[in-house]
Image: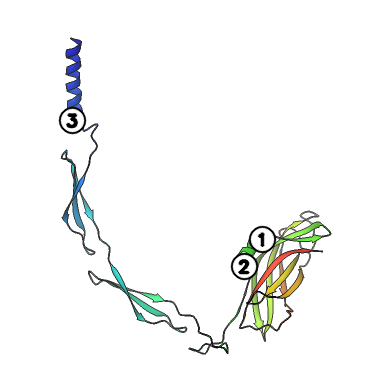
Amino acid sequence: MKLKNLVIFAVIYAMFLSLCGCGHVHDYKETVITEPTCTSDGLSEFKCECGESYTEKTKKEHEYESNLIKEPTCQKTGQMEYKCKSCGDTYTEVVEKSSHTYGSNKYCTVCGAKKVGSVKLPSTSYGNTYDYIRYGTVVSTCKITDLSYEWKYNTLTLYITGKKIYDYAGDTGDNVCSLLFIMYDSHGNIICSDQLMTQHVIVNETFKYYYVPTPTVLLDETEDYRIEFRDYTV
């Protein structure tokens, strides 16, 4: 009797699994009904050997080829055209101006523009802090938040903005901040080294410093320079 009941249960359970699909993992095979193009959807059928099936729309991307239709110069932008080789769809993009080509006289051989140099502070310097160390004690700490400059008759003026973040006398202490300023030419040679000392400021107060470097060589506004700050120690 028990064996008969077990057989009946097994048959019913097998019928249940067959009807609900339990225990079966679908393995769909794709059949393309309509091939897609870059302008219209296609259609594919996915069918399992058990008979279960569904359809999905399929897509195809444009295949663009580029063609420079207008050369850029140092004065004007250029233009690039992109054209689909299947359907002919097109769009264009602006090509940025090319760089100046400077001759030995530092004027562009194409447009005649005079070379403009640069004065750069490494971007990592804006996250650094600089200590003023006097006889082994850190008197104050600051960081640089902005730097700009201007040239006038080959004289360079730096506009330095910073913020005081520590004073050994506490938040209300008004000791000056002091940094070591170093300037390099385009070949990496040090041409200026000097102490910069701000006005008396308290912690979290912003300071502005105007400085005209006095390098060992004559500056040239057509050249590229790099500056650096370091801790200043007495």
> Is 76 left, or right, of 43 in this rendering?
right
Amino acid type indicated by mark 1: Asn
First reached walking from the N terminus: tag 2 or tag 1? 2
Q: Mark 2 points at which residue?
A: 122
Q: How far apart are marks 2 and 1 (CA)?
A: 11 Å
Q: Where is residue 25 drawn, in percent x and y?
A: 24, 37
Quadrant of image for the N terminus: top left
Q: Name the residue under label 3.
A: 18
Q: Name the residue under label 1.
A: 128
- Vertical relation: 136 (above or below) 91: above
| Among the 4 quarters of the image, the one containing residue 165 | bottom right
Q: Where is residue 18 drawn, in percent x and y?
A: 18, 30
First reached walking from the N terminus: tag 3 or tag 1? 3
Q: Where is residue 183 drawn, in percent x and y?
A: 69, 74
Amino acid type indicated by mark 2: Pro
Quadrant of image for the C terminus: bottom right
Disc ID at residue 6: none
- SS label for mark 1: loop
Q: Distance between the residues labelled 2 and 3?
A: 71 Å
In this view, the residue in front, 148 or 85, is 85
> Is 178 left, or right, of 125 in this rendering?
right
- SS label for mark 3: helix
Residue at x-position 23% and y-position 34%: 24
Q: Where is residue 89 drawn, in percent x and y?
A: 26, 71
